[in-house]
């Protein structure tokens, strides 16, 4: 099984999680602490791209093996989280809240929580803090990246390895431009959409 381990990146992950936790405990403790999520996106994009490139260069890349590893890494913890939330909701939520929770669980189970929340959730609104699965939006972005990027990368690699950097820079620029426009127009849904976040995952 191919893997890439970087102790320095593990340390960066530990540092990134602290401001996120403090921000959600009390936003005044760490204003802007949510940027820790952006750091995780960069780390994830770097590791996945490095892994894909290594396997492609060694002619070991397999879509089946790649997605098998992703499922093995993500599915157990996700399943436990969703089960705990549905049990909690069954006992403590009213019928309307439980119905809404059911939709959150459905989309989260299929890696589409971000697309669901993009339909009308303000991540920074106070009531959003009481949606137990809202934080799975970032996992949705990552999972969609896992679906699209290996296909794009392999297609470009087979065409010409020398095109990987130019194509990546072009996609980075397009996504970054979309993100800037979204922020300038106060487009809340842009916070969740993968094409507004792709530039972070492509920052390798």
Image (spheres, rainbow, N blue to C red):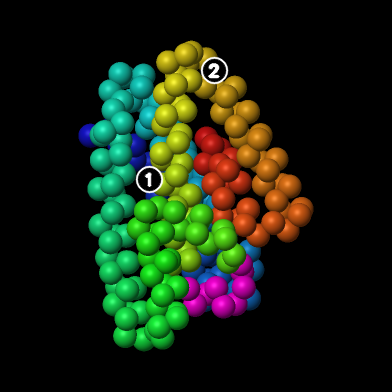
Q: Magenta segment, which residues?
A: 122-132
**The N terminus lies in quadrant:** top left
Closer to us: 95 or 136: 95
**Residue 50, position in %: x, y?**
42, 31
* Residue depicted at 63% across the width and 39% down the height: 175
Please determine whether, in this image, residue 193 is positioned above or below residue 118. above
Which of the pair 26/150 is nearer the observer?
A: 150
> Along the polypeptide, which appears first: circle 1 or circle 2?
1
Give the residue drawn at x 76%, y 53%: 184
Tag 1 secondary structure: helix
Query: Crowdedness of circle 1 by 10 Å Cα count: few (<14), some, many (20+)?
Result: few
Q: How many marks?
A: 2
Where residue 121 appears, as percent x and y from the top left, is 58, 66
Q: Are marks 1 and 2 in contact (CB under 8 Å)?
A: no
- Residue nearest the observer in this picture, 176 or 108: 108
Secondary element type, mark 2:
helix
Report whether residue 10 is seen: yes
- The answer to which quarter of the image holds residue 112 is bottom left
Q: Residue at x 45, y 26 (%)?
A: 153
- The circle on residue 7 is 1
Which residue does the numbered mark 2 point to in the structure image?
163
- The image quadrant of residue 2 is top left
Q: Which residue is pictured at 36% across the width and 25% down the height?
A: 54
Mark 1–mark 2 distance (CA, rounded to whole Å): 30 Å
State yes or no: residue 25 in magenta.
no
> Where does the image place residue 176, in percent across and percent down from the top left?
66, 41
* Figure check: 21 above or below 184: below
């Amino acid at each position: 099984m191919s893997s890439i381990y970087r102790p320095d990146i593990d340390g960066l992950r530990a540092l990134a999680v602290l401001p996120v936790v403090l921000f959600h405990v009390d936003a005044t403790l760490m204003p802007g602490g949510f940027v820790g999520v952006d750091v995780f996106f960069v780390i994830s994009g770097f590791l996945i791209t490095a892994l894909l490139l290594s396997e492609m260069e060694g002619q070991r890349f397999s879509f089946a093996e790649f997605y098998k590893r992703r499922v093995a890494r993500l599915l157990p913890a996700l399943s436990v989280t969703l089960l705990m939330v549905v049990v909690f909701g069954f006992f403590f939520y009213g019928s309307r809240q439980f119905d809404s929770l059911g939709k959150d669980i459905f989309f989260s189970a299929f890696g589409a929580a971000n697309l669901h929340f993009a339909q009308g959730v303000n991540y920074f609104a106070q009531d959003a803090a009481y949606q137990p699965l809202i934080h799975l939006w970032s996992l949705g972005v990552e999972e969609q990246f896992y679906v699209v990027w290996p296909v794009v990368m392999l297609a470009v690699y087979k065409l010409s390895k020398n095109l990987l950097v130019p194509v990546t820079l072009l996609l980075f620029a397009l996504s970054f431009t979309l993100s800037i426009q979204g922020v300038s127009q106060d487009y809340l849904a842009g916070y969740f959409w993968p094409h507004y976040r792709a530039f972070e995952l492509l920052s390798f």
